[in-house]
Image (tube, rainbow, N blue to C red):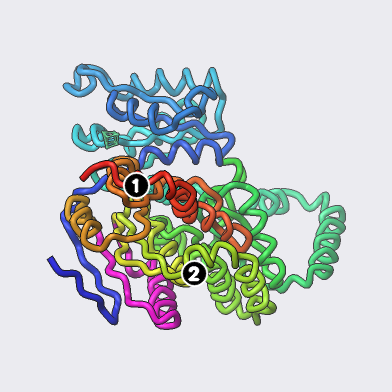
Amino acid sequence: MTISESKDLTFECETGNYHTFCPISCVAWLYQKIEDSFFLVIGTKTCGYFLQNSMGVMIFAEPRYAMAELEEGDISAQLNDYEELKRLCLQIKRDRNPSVIVWIGTCTTEIIKMDLEGMAPKLESEIGIPIVVARANGLDYAFTQGEDTVLAAMAQRCPSVSTSEINQKESNKFSSLFNFAQKKIQSNEQKLNLVDHQPLVLFGSLPDPVVTQLNLELQKQGITVSGWLPAKRYMELPIIKEGNYVCGVHPFLSRTATTLMRRRKCKLISAPFPIGPDGTRAWIEKICLSLGIEPKGLEEREQQIWDSLTDYLNLVRGKSVFFMGDNLLEVSLARFLIRCGMIVHEIGIPYMDKRYQAAELNLLEETCRKMGTAMPRIVEKPDNYNQIQRIQQLKPDLVITGMAQANPLEARGINTKWSVEFTFAQIHGFSNARDILELVTRPLRRKGNLRELGWNTLIE
Ligand code: SF4
């Protein structure tokens, strides 16, 4: 087998025989993000085993998720699905009293065609708690796409009228007080030089400190973020009106983007994702451009970050990397690493939405040209077996992969980085670029430290 280098981005599609996390794993970070939620995964013991193991120590912290384990009787339709779910949801209401229950559909509910979407509205009105249905199953999706299914479902629940508007319609009694508050907000806005622009809602679940950082970066350009999907609490879902601007922070949210555009009639800002200083700058610039604002000081800000990364850049420059692909962050990370001076052989990715990722793909091409490196091949639905053959041939300095391949590759003298860490680490925005390089260089530094011991390859 020969592997050729291309001058343009090449897209290939393999068999889809690859390792990744099941999308139901999104409950792990979403229940932490949405503090008043409860996630009910309706599946089998297989799903339960997976969650129990993948979530590690979090499982002992009384998480706000549970499994509704289907039994023989459920599958053969001897039991009444509706009554069973009602019993469980009432128990959740009694024990935890959440503001929303999210039902996560699994492979089994798909195969036995359990009508979750049909049951939810009826049960919702009966028990008085909103029920959001997301089909985050392993038949259709991979890992982070689970968040996409949940957010797409939540996008439909975002209010289109603010409570203050409703109250105002009902009574103008407090109008003077309201005006006073408005004036106070206006004077604050003047202090920050905020520009009057169309409302902007950002979507994608990020840890709260990163949300604050990105809000502040945009504020420096005079932009106010009207809200985030998801917010810290379900009750604080952002107001979304027709014609509002929306922009994503993750490369895996194509369904949410589609829902916001088609169902909520929002205007999508297609931008590269704010990963790495190059991506963050491009993301802010694109938002400014769409809102008719002149971006300022971004070039210096980006340069400042690059300067602060010099020690890491010296370590990675000229090294090669191979993404086996399992979390859809691959294109953005590869683009950043190429900009850092690395050579990317292959970008494996579970699913590629060329429309949603268009700006990111353009930036990837532009970066390759700027850095004078060959364009990587993008392999959608990769075949792990074939990839291992290519890795053996290419001998990359680093393979970014799942835990299934990491140790076997290490034993064969190939450096690996566990890909899942990129999903949970804080990698967005200017200041977190350091964290990405910290992760990428860790195996390289370890190899340097252990070289003297002389057992790099343990298996022939
Ligand atoms: S792939 Fe299907 S059966 Fe397996 S854990 Fe995910 S939802 Fe459950």
Ligand 1's image quarter is: top left
Element class at badge 1? loop
The outermost residue toward the left is 1
Q: Give the number of the disc on residue 456.
A: 1
Which residues fall within the magenta stretch?
351-380
- For badge 2, the amino acid type reads Cys
Would you say 140 lies left or right of 282 here?
left
Is 48 or 224 nearer to us in this picture? 48
Magenta span has 379? Answer: yes
Residue drawn at point x = 63 percent, y = 68 percent: 305
Q: Position of residue 409 (x, y in %)?
A: 29, 47
Would you say 105 lies left or right of 232 here?
left
Kindly identify which residue carries mark 2.
340
**From the viewer's perspective, is residue 347 above or below residue 222?**
above
Camera-near label (1 vs 2) is: 1
Q: CA distance from mark 1 to mark 2?
A: 26 Å
Report if residue 247 is visible in the image: no
Point out the tag, 1 or 2, that comes first from the N-terminus: 2
* Quarter in which the N terminus is drawn: bottom left
**From the viewer's perspective, is residue 376 above or below residue 19?**
below
Q: Position of residue 332 (x, y in %)?
A: 43, 64
**From the viewer's perspective, is residue 284 above or below residue 352?**
below
Would you say 399 lies left or right of 154 here?
left
